[in-house]
Image (cartoon, rainbow, N blue to C red):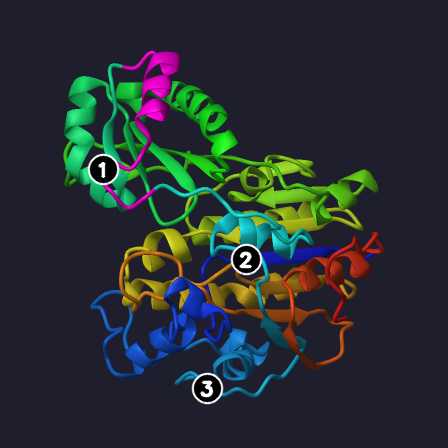
Amino acid sequence: MPRAILCVLDSFGIGGAPDAADYGDIGADTLLHIAEACAAGQGDQPGLRHGPLSLPNLDALGLGAAGRLSSGTLAPGLSGMPRGGRWGVGREVSKGKDTPSGHWEIAGVPVPFDWGYFPNTEPCFPPTLIEAFIKEAKLPGILGNKHASGTTIIAELGEEHIRTGRPICYTSIDSVFQIAAHESHFGLDRLYEICEIAFRLTEPMMIGRVIARPFVGETPETFKRTGNRRDFAIAPPEPTLLDRAKAAGRQVFAIGKISDIYATRGVTHKLKANGNMRLFDKTLEALEMAPDGALIFTNFVEFDQEFGHRRDVPGYAAALEDFDRRLPELIAKMQSDDLLILTADHGNDPTWRGSDHTREQVPILSFSPSLSQGEVGIRPSLADIGASIAQWLGLDVGPHGRSFL
């Protein structure tokens, strides 16, 4: 019985979304702009990387061709000549450009409603929400209460947080309420506890996630977020690919933040790791232990969290090249009837203004030793990915999406 490996390169868009204007993102293109910057020498960083963007393994699976189909331009450094598998472009129909919407749609459930958002004002959270949060969580108060980058606000307020015991609360353009706190001074379990309270209070507002952002260190120079992040998320409104797989008795390996994104639904094994390469290691480990019929689902968060939001072109380029170098390891461990799909949930162009996600189309790169090569075109919904995996695994395809296999 075949298995499926689904890898989401978080935020790796390829431009061209037809509704980009609705989000202020006309012209955003994560792949193309990284590649152009590298070709111009703007992706060089001593000790990290230099020269044109080099992604030979992703290119062989169709990345260059998919980027050209999406935006009309071949990214510098890529050949645009696939040598295996089926490739195409995914177009999101869900509203918003956030993590849950993209992931839910990939798993066969487009988001039919509008998320709630906090205004870009200071303070940004409603007073009634914060009053209830402080009271129910028994807190001396909060810090932040604004739109901010996670690393920046921790550097700004981390010492005051340690001194006062007040958690750092902030948001972004996404539908999210984030809480940063020190793992030892505040306590990891205590952070999770107050996040559960915040999630209960924000759920009626349709805020997609409350995210626990633990960190360590004693000074702004040494503060560092840890791998103990936890997302408290609204559950999908319908059964996803993960639910259908679990209901059919299959094993579902959720690696990274996948389990949190789906509110733990449909998951039989949860594997956590910090950093893309450790996530890659966990994916290989899951592939070693996964029985026939299993689904392995990994989110590679660093592309988005560490490089897209921080507008770090060299870092994003180096992370892509690191991932590309390891792809042959994954392919070598696949059985003859295993299916690998590489895709993304949205864009996050590191050359774009601000620090928000960008509304883009995404690559769909499919490979199996038993799958013929070919183009699958521009898919009208990311739900086609879930439908394709369901077909491959012999599961109910579900009401949304159509297989391209």
Residue flagged by tag 2: what amino acid is it?
Val
User: In terms of depth relative to the viewer, which is nearer, 291 or 172?
Assistant: 172
Residue flagged by tag 3: what amino acid is it?
Leu
Distance between mark 1 and mark 2 Cα atoms: 27 Å
Among numbered discs 3 and 2, the one appearing first in the sequence = 2
Seen at 78% across and 54% down, the residue is 399
Provide the secondary structure element on which disc 1 rests. helix
Q: Report how many numbered discs are placed on residues in the image.
A: 3
Is residue 51 visible to us here?
Answer: no
Q: Is residue 225 above or below residue 284?
A: above
Q: Position of residue 231 (x, y in %)?
A: 48, 36
Q: Position of residue 31 (x, y in %)?
A: 42, 73
Is residue 128 a member of the stretch shown in magenta? yes
Residue flagged by tag 1: what amino acid is it?
Ile
The stretch in magenta equals 119-139
Which residue is identified by label 2? Answer: 8
Q: Is residue 251 left or right of residue 143?
A: right
- Local crowd at mark 3 within 10 Å, few (<14), some, or many (≥20)? many
Which residue is identified by label 3? Answer: 74
Q: Is residue 43 above or below residue 175?
A: below
Is the C terminus in the top left, top right, bottom left or bottom right quadrant? Answer: bottom right
Distance between mark 1 and mark 3 Cα atoms: 39 Å
Provide the secondary structure element on which disc 2 rests. strand
- Local crowd at mark 1 within 10 Å, few (<14), some, or many (≥20)? many
Q: Position of residue 403 (x, y in %)?
A: 76, 66
Which residue is identified by label 1? Answer: 154
Check residue 374 in the rendering and tell me which mark sits there, or answer none: none
Is label 1 in contact with label 2 (beta carbons under 8 Å)? Answer: no
Q: Is residue 185 left or right of residue 253?
A: left
User: In terms of depth relative to the viewer, which is nearer, 170 or 68?
Assistant: 170
Seen at 51% across and 43% down, the residue is 257
